[in-house]
Image (cartoon, rainbow, N blue to C red):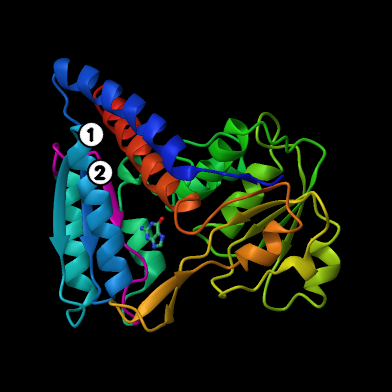
Amino acid sequence: MTTILDGTELADRIEADVATATDRLAEAGTTPGLATVLMSDDGASETYVSMKQRTCEELGINSFHHEIDPDKSAAALFERIDALNDDPEVHGILVQMPVPDHVDKQQVLERIDPIKDVDGFHPENVGRLVAGNARYKPCTPHGIQKLMAAYDIETAGKDVVVIGRSDIVGKPMANLLIQYGAGGNATTTVCHSRTRDLGEKTRSADIVIAAAGVPELVDGALLSEGVTVIDVGVNRVDANTDKGYELVGDVDFESAKGKASAITPVPGGVGPLTIAMLMHNTVKAASLQSE
Ligand code: GUN
């Protein structure tokens, strides 16, 4: 029997707690506010941002959406970030990644006031995370920790393989896994595009977290019996559907399910938790700024 790790159900529970905390803060005079900034025409980014806005509204969090023409200069984005840094109604700022090539991503992340950096991507917040003293845990890795905890999947002493070394998922995930305490204490290997023999690593893993952005990279042949599989991939692959594409994970679900004791679906696995943890961080930001 393979357990399907239901991210939607857990996200609903986390969001109910966030709504309660939001009400409490609002009664005390601070309604949490999240600003989303989109500088892209990419359809997937537009969808993600609108899902974040919608969830804010459902939970009583103020949502402020800003779009910057992707043909504009970096200065236009920086001016907007500066204004949001100064706006007392905005407690969290999220600039949807990726930004256009002519905009330096690192400069964007460093421009956001670290106390409003609900993604946890500012170097100050990355430093705190690595030091084991996170202020805002990055949303996707934090959601994965919550999902494993909810299903009593132990990480302590386990061999975990993270596939992908992105700043958004792979690197912070590996950092959380090696930390002391719940959801950590794992022996962690990070694999990436230059890894020589991926299967050798993944077949010796108790937990495989696939976050490479490569459709169906991981199949049953790469896995050992009883493994836990966490699929972070949300890849748009051309298909004969209404939208012209279908969403495919980094894992070939059917063959991986044949080996796994537990596995996340796509959609309905990690995705909803990313949004739930963003809402959690936004309320934390409002709370820190109302002290
Ligand atoms: N693009 C893909 N995932 C994310 C995320 O978690 N935060 C931001 N800001 N951009 C993203």
Residue 33 in sight from this viewpoint: no
* Mark 1 to mark 2 CA distance (whole Å): 6 Å
Task: Quadrant for the N terminus, please.
Answer: top right
Compared with 223, 142 (above or below) is above
Magenta-drawn stretch contains 92: yes
Residue corresponding to mark 2: 55
Q: Secondary structure at mark 2?
A: helix
- Residue 18 placement, left or right of 65: right
- Residue 225 placement, left or right of 40: right
Give the residue displayed 29% in from the left and 22% down from the top: 21
Q: 113 and 39: which one is in front? A: 39
Q: Look at the image and give the residue range highlighted in magenta.
A: 87-101
Q: Position of residue 208 (x, y in %)?
A: 70, 56
**Numbered marks: total:** 2
Task: Say what amino acid the circle numbered 2 marks.
Answer: Thr
Magenta-drawn stretch contains 283: no
Give the residue displayed 30% in from the left and 31% down from the top: 283
Q: Position of residue 198 (x, y in %)?
A: 78, 71
Give the residue displayed 69% in from the left and 62% down from the top: 256
Residue corresponding to mark 1: 59
Q: Position of residue 59 (x, y in %)?
A: 23, 34
Question: Is the residue at mark 2 in contact range of ligand 1, meaning its CB lies under 8 Å from it?
Answer: no
